[in-house]
Image (cartoon, coloured by chain):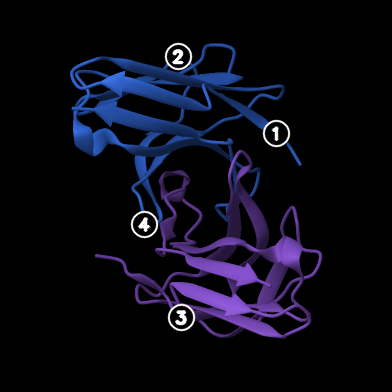
Chain colours: A blue, B purple
Amino acid sequence: GQQLNQSPQSMFIQEGEDVSMNCTSSSIFNTWLWYKQDPGEGPVLLIALYKAGELTSNGRLTAQFGITRKDSFLNISASIPSDVGIYFCARAGGTSYGKLTFGQGTILTVHP
Amino acid sequence: DVKVTQSSRYLVKRTGEKVFLECVQDMDHENMFWYRQDPGLGLRLIYFSYDVKMKEKGDIPEGYSVSREKKERFSLILESASTNQTSMYLCASRDGTGALANEKLFFGSGTQLSVL
Protein backbone atom coordinates (compact mmCIF):
# COMPACT_ATOMS: atom_id res chain seq x y z
CA GLY A 1 0.00 0.00 0.00
CA GLN A 2 0.88 3.67 -0.02
CA GLN A 3 3.67 4.58 2.41
CA LEU A 4 4.09 7.58 4.63
CA ASN A 5 7.56 8.61 5.79
CA GLN A 6 7.51 10.20 9.19
CA SER A 7 10.50 11.85 10.85
CA PRO A 8 12.23 11.99 13.16
CA GLN A 9 11.77 8.50 14.60
CA SER A 10 12.40 9.75 18.12
CA MET A 11 13.11 12.98 19.97
CA PHE A 12 14.50 13.68 23.42
CA ILE A 13 13.87 17.25 24.53
CA GLN A 14 13.83 19.42 27.62
CA GLU A 15 10.58 20.73 29.04
CA GLY A 16 9.77 24.12 27.51
CA GLU A 17 11.37 23.41 24.14
CA ASP A 18 9.46 23.52 20.87
CA VAL A 19 9.06 20.35 18.81
CA SER A 20 8.63 19.84 15.08
CA MET A 21 7.93 16.65 13.16
CA ASN A 22 6.84 15.95 9.62
CA CYS A 23 5.35 13.40 7.31
CA THR A 24 5.86 12.97 3.57
CA SER A 25 4.34 10.85 0.87
CA SER A 26 5.03 10.16 -2.79
CA SER A 27 1.32 10.56 -3.56
CA ILE A 28 -1.16 13.40 -3.25
CA PHE A 29 -3.82 13.12 -0.54
CA ASN A 30 -6.91 15.11 0.38
CA THR A 31 -6.78 14.57 4.13
CA TRP A 32 -3.98 14.57 6.68
CA LEU A 33 -4.49 13.55 10.27
CA TRP A 34 -2.29 13.67 13.37
CA TYR A 35 -2.83 11.23 16.24
CA LYS A 36 -1.15 10.91 19.63
CA GLN A 37 -0.74 7.68 21.58
CA ASP A 38 -0.19 8.03 25.31
CA PRO A 39 1.71 5.19 26.99
CA GLY A 40 -0.60 2.19 27.46
CA GLU A 41 -3.45 3.69 25.47
CA GLY A 42 -4.75 3.72 21.91
CA PRO A 43 -4.11 6.68 19.57
CA VAL A 44 -6.35 9.75 19.85
CA LEU A 45 -6.99 12.25 17.05
CA LEU A 46 -5.30 15.62 17.62
CA ILE A 47 -5.80 17.53 14.40
CA ALA A 48 -7.41 16.91 10.99
CA LEU A 49 -6.45 18.86 7.83
CA TYR A 50 -8.55 18.92 4.68
CA LYS A 51 -7.15 21.60 2.37
CA ALA A 52 -3.72 22.24 0.88
CA GLY A 53 -2.02 25.07 2.77
CA GLU A 54 -4.39 24.75 5.73
CA LEU A 55 -2.90 25.67 9.10
CA THR A 56 -4.80 24.45 12.16
CA SER A 57 -4.11 24.84 15.87
CA ASN A 58 -5.23 22.87 18.89
CA GLY A 59 -3.84 24.54 22.00
CA ARG A 60 -0.04 24.36 21.83
CA LEU A 61 -0.22 22.14 18.75
CA THR A 62 -0.15 23.49 15.22
CA ALA A 63 -0.35 21.39 12.06
CA GLN A 64 -0.09 22.33 8.42
CA PHE A 65 -1.21 20.61 5.24
CA GLY A 66 1.62 21.11 2.75
CA ILE A 67 0.90 23.13 -0.35
CA THR A 68 2.03 20.25 -2.59
CA ARG A 69 -0.49 17.96 -0.77
CA LYS A 70 2.33 15.47 -0.26
CA ASP A 71 3.43 16.47 3.22
CA SER A 72 2.30 17.70 6.60
CA PHE A 73 3.97 19.19 9.67
CA LEU A 74 3.14 19.11 13.37
CA ASN A 75 4.63 21.61 15.82
CA ILE A 76 4.34 21.57 19.60
CA SER A 77 5.27 24.75 21.42
CA ALA A 78 6.59 24.98 24.99
CA SER A 79 6.54 21.22 25.59
CA ILE A 80 5.45 19.80 28.93
CA PRO A 81 5.95 16.31 30.43
CA SER A 82 2.46 15.13 29.43
CA ASP A 83 3.40 15.63 25.76
CA VAL A 84 5.30 12.34 26.06
CA GLY A 85 4.00 9.67 23.71
CA ILE A 86 4.04 8.51 20.12
CA TYR A 87 2.78 10.87 17.42
CA PHE A 88 1.45 9.43 14.19
CA CYS A 89 0.57 11.09 10.95
CA ALA A 90 -2.13 9.42 8.86
CA ARG A 91 -3.83 9.91 5.55
CA ALA A 92 -7.33 8.91 4.56
CA GLY A 93 -8.01 6.51 1.74
CA GLY A 94 -10.21 7.14 -1.27
CA THR A 95 -13.37 5.60 0.17
CA SER A 96 -15.76 6.79 2.82
CA TYR A 97 -14.91 3.88 5.11
CA GLY A 98 -12.28 5.74 7.12
CA LYS A 99 -9.49 3.41 6.05
CA LEU A 100 -6.33 5.16 7.22
CA THR A 101 -2.66 4.62 6.44
CA PHE A 102 -0.32 5.59 9.28
CA GLY A 103 3.27 6.77 9.40
CA GLN A 104 5.91 4.97 11.45
CA GLY A 105 5.45 7.29 14.42
CA THR A 106 7.64 9.78 16.30
CA ILE A 107 8.46 8.83 19.90
CA LEU A 108 8.65 11.99 22.02
CA THR A 109 10.39 12.04 25.40
CA VAL A 110 10.29 15.22 27.48
CA HIS A 111 12.76 15.65 30.33
CA PRO A 112 11.50 17.85 33.20
CA ASP B 1 -17.76 9.47 25.23
CA VAL B 2 -17.21 6.71 22.72
CA LYS B 3 -15.82 3.60 24.28
CA VAL B 4 -13.97 0.89 22.40
CA THR B 5 -13.21 -2.05 24.67
CA GLN B 6 -10.75 -4.80 23.92
CA SER B 7 -11.34 -7.91 26.00
CA SER B 8 -7.73 -8.56 27.03
CA ARG B 9 -4.84 -6.25 27.78
CA TYR B 10 -2.22 -9.01 27.64
CA LEU B 11 -2.35 -12.48 26.10
CA VAL B 12 0.25 -15.22 25.96
CA LYS B 13 -0.37 -18.06 23.53
CA ARG B 14 1.59 -20.95 22.09
CA THR B 15 2.52 -21.47 18.45
CA GLY B 16 -0.29 -23.22 16.60
CA GLU B 17 -3.07 -22.16 18.96
CA LYS B 18 -6.23 -20.55 17.66
CA VAL B 19 -6.53 -17.06 19.14
CA PHE B 20 -9.56 -14.79 19.38
CA LEU B 21 -9.21 -11.06 20.03
CA GLU B 22 -12.50 -9.39 20.86
CA CYS B 23 -13.51 -5.77 20.45
CA VAL B 24 -16.77 -4.04 21.42
CA GLN B 25 -17.85 -0.44 20.76
CA ASP B 26 -20.81 1.32 22.33
CA MET B 27 -21.56 4.13 19.86
CA ASP B 28 -23.43 2.25 17.13
CA HIS B 29 -20.59 2.86 14.67
CA GLU B 30 -20.85 1.19 11.27
CA ASN B 31 -17.13 0.83 10.60
CA MET B 32 -14.66 -1.17 12.66
CA PHE B 33 -10.96 -1.88 12.13
CA TRP B 34 -8.13 -4.07 13.35
CA TYR B 35 -4.56 -2.71 13.25
CA ARG B 36 -1.30 -4.15 14.52
CA GLN B 37 1.40 -1.90 15.92
CA ASP B 38 5.07 -2.78 15.73
CA PRO B 39 8.05 -0.56 16.65
CA GLY B 40 9.33 1.37 13.64
CA LEU B 41 6.44 0.22 11.45
CA GLY B 42 3.59 2.29 12.86
CA LEU B 43 0.04 0.96 12.61
CA ARG B 44 -0.78 -1.43 9.80
CA LEU B 45 -4.34 -2.31 8.83
CA ILE B 46 -5.20 -6.01 9.00
CA TYR B 47 -8.94 -6.05 8.26
CA PHE B 48 -11.86 -3.71 8.41
CA SER B 49 -15.63 -4.03 8.39
CA TYR B 50 -17.96 -1.38 7.03
CA ASP B 51 -21.14 -3.07 8.22
CA VAL B 52 -22.44 -6.19 9.93
CA LYS B 53 -21.25 -9.35 8.16
CA MET B 54 -19.20 -7.23 5.74
CA LYS B 55 -15.41 -7.32 5.76
CA GLU B 56 -12.50 -6.26 3.62
CA LYS B 57 -8.82 -7.10 3.72
CA GLY B 58 -6.42 -4.42 4.80
CA ASP B 59 -2.72 -4.22 3.99
CA ILE B 60 -1.55 -7.31 5.95
CA PRO B 61 -4.42 -9.84 6.17
CA GLU B 62 -2.33 -13.00 5.80
CA GLY B 63 -2.69 -15.32 8.79
CA TYR B 64 -5.78 -13.51 10.10
CA SER B 65 -9.53 -13.66 9.69
CA VAL B 66 -12.36 -11.60 11.20
CA SER B 67 -15.97 -11.95 12.23
CA ARG B 68 -18.68 -9.29 12.58
CA GLU B 69 -21.98 -10.94 13.49
CA LYS B 70 -23.26 -7.97 15.49
CA LYS B 71 -22.75 -4.27 14.86
CA GLU B 72 -21.02 -3.61 18.16
CA ARG B 73 -18.55 -6.50 18.06
CA PHE B 74 -15.59 -7.16 15.76
CA SER B 75 -13.40 -10.20 16.36
CA LEU B 76 -9.91 -10.88 15.05
CA ILE B 77 -8.97 -14.54 14.67
CA LEU B 78 -5.53 -16.06 14.37
CA GLU B 79 -6.25 -19.53 13.02
CA SER B 80 -2.82 -20.89 13.94
CA ALA B 81 -0.73 -18.41 15.88
CA SER B 82 2.90 -17.95 14.90
CA THR B 83 5.76 -16.13 16.62
CA ASN B 84 5.77 -13.39 13.98
CA GLN B 85 2.26 -12.47 15.10
CA THR B 86 3.58 -11.29 18.45
CA SER B 87 2.48 -7.67 18.44
CA MET B 88 0.21 -4.99 19.88
CA TYR B 89 -3.27 -5.25 18.33
CA LEU B 90 -5.49 -2.20 18.22
CA CYS B 91 -9.19 -2.15 17.45
CA ALA B 92 -10.92 1.03 16.24
CA SER B 93 -14.37 2.18 15.24
CA ARG B 94 -15.76 5.08 13.22
CA ASP B 95 -19.09 6.69 12.49
CA GLY B 96 -19.62 5.54 8.90
CA THR B 97 -22.01 8.18 7.62
CA GLY B 98 -19.49 9.04 4.90
CA ALA B 99 -19.16 12.71 5.75
CA LEU B 100 -15.61 14.01 5.24
CA ALA B 101 -15.39 15.19 8.83
CA ASN B 102 -15.87 11.65 10.07
CA GLU B 103 -12.32 10.43 9.48
CA LYS B 104 -11.93 10.27 13.25
CA LEU B 105 -11.18 6.78 14.49
CA PHE B 106 -11.77 5.82 18.11
CA PHE B 107 -9.23 3.28 19.34
CA GLY B 108 -9.27 0.72 22.13
CA SER B 109 -6.34 0.49 24.55
CA GLY B 110 -4.81 -2.45 22.72
CA THR B 111 -4.04 -6.12 23.33
CA GLN B 112 -0.38 -7.09 23.64
CA LEU B 113 -0.17 -10.61 22.24
CA SER B 114 2.88 -12.78 22.80
CA VAL B 115 3.16 -16.02 20.84
CA LEU B 116 5.74 -18.41 22.28
Q: Amino acid at mark 2?
A: Gly
| Residues packed near mark 4 inside 10 Å, few (<14), some (14 to 19) or many (20 plus) | some
What is the number of the mark on residue A41?
A: 4
Residue A33's place in the image compared with B83, above or below, is above
**Of residues B33 and A86, which is closer to you in this image?**
A86
Determine whether label 1 and label 3 are within 8 Å by CB: no
- The secondary element bearing badge 4 is classed as loop
Chain for mark 4?
A
Q: Amino acid at mark 3?
A: Glu
Q: Earlier in the sequence, mark 1 or mark 2?
A: 1
Q: Amino acid at mark 1?
A: Gln
| Tag 1 residue | A3
Q: Residue sitting at 74 percent across and 71 percent down? A: B64
Q: CA distance from mark 1 to mark 2?
A: 21 Å
What is the number of the mark on residue A53?
A: 2
What is the number of the mark on residue B72?
A: 3
